[in-house]
Image (cartoon, coloured by chain):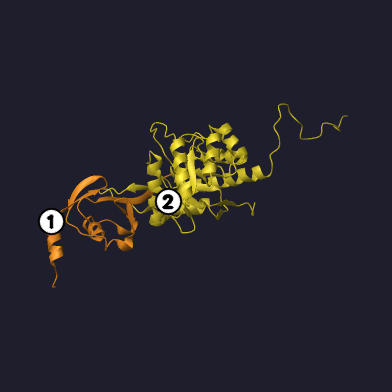
Amino acid sequence: MENDILTLGGITFTNRLFTGTGKFAANSQIPGMLAASGSQMITVALRRIDNDARAENILKYIPDNVTLLPNTSGARTAEQAVRVARIAREAGCGPFIKIEVITDMKYLMPDNWETLKATEILAREGFVVLPYVLPDLVLARQLEQAGAAAVMPLGAPIGTNRGLETASLIQLLIENCTVPVVVDAGIGRPSQAAAAMEMGADAVLVNTAIATARDPQAMGRAFDLAVKAGRAAYLADMAEESTLARASSPLTGFLDD
Amino acid sequence: MIGWDWETAFLWVCDMELIINGEQQNIPVGTITELVEYKRLEAQSLVVELNRAIIKQEQWASVQLKPGDRLELLSFVGGG
């Protein structure tokens, strides 16, 4: 496990839990959550300033050794996503970008087609592109061709905490993609994160389930343990399932035989 | 000059029409630095886009705004 690293955009990650900065009751909870979870990559969003409510600078809560993953949330087209990505990089957030293009506001389903277009443009410009998508193998291959650094399929709609509803489709990505697969969105419990890692996901991205827990710091630790357990199980090659029972103890040599 | 000059005086009497975050506003400022001060914004977390080009903080004082300029004043917020 010590040598088990994940490389994205030339940066090595020893922790496979990516986190987000949304929905915390107080942003001051973020540093403690990062320390407890060991997360080395965290998402942020870019918005117009609100003149009335003075928004805090979220970046001041993120230590330098944690990689920033700005997202393009709010973008409805590839063009808008590209614009947000360029602004984020110019503003000093580094080359990583999570492409999130959403036009369906009821289920927050990602627009796979616009996401692919934005991926092509941004990968050409040298971004480390992590597209958030519905798990579709054909699209995932196109994203790889377009230069995506990873694919990030959703487990369930954003913020629903319903877990791996798309498990069988994610499995196809895991078995066929050459880039890392990061399960993003919908993971509500540590056991679901562990299940994703057992399946062979390279990482998971968890925001809501940690940020809105009563104790985000403790929940961050719980997710870290779960991701590590799931990863260790995957690397150990899990034993097969069987319909009928198979005794674990010898069935011969009882006392009265 | 003691305390003022003609340029500053001109700016004080002439509001400039700018489009800030999609909204038309009349503001008596000349540079981005002056705009940031006028609006009492926290400079540290502010990202400024002028007519679709990012203006780095070091350039704020030297970039003169023109009537009709489109500005986006942005900052990083929590998001997943």
Circle 1 residue: B14
Task: Please tell me if label 1 and label 2 are on a single chain.
Answer: no
Label 1 crowding class (10 Å Cα cut-off): few <14, some 14-19, many 20+?
Answer: few
* Location of residue A194 with respect to B35 vertically, above or below: above
Circle 2 residue: A29
* Location of residue A89 with respect to A243 vertically, above or below: below
- Note whether residue A214 is visible: no
| Residue B64 place in picture, x, y as percent | 23, 59
Horizontal side of A151 relative to A93 (left or right) equals: right
Label 2 crowding class (10 Å Cα cut-off): few <14, some 14-19, many 20+?
Answer: some
**Element class at badge 2:** helix
Instruction: Write down which chain is painted yellow.
Output: A
C-alpha distance separating marks 1 and 2: 46 Å
Horizontal side of A97 relative to A170 (left or right) equals: left
Circle 2: residue type: Gln
Chain B: give its colour.
orange
* Location of residue A153 with respect to B42 vertically, above or below: above
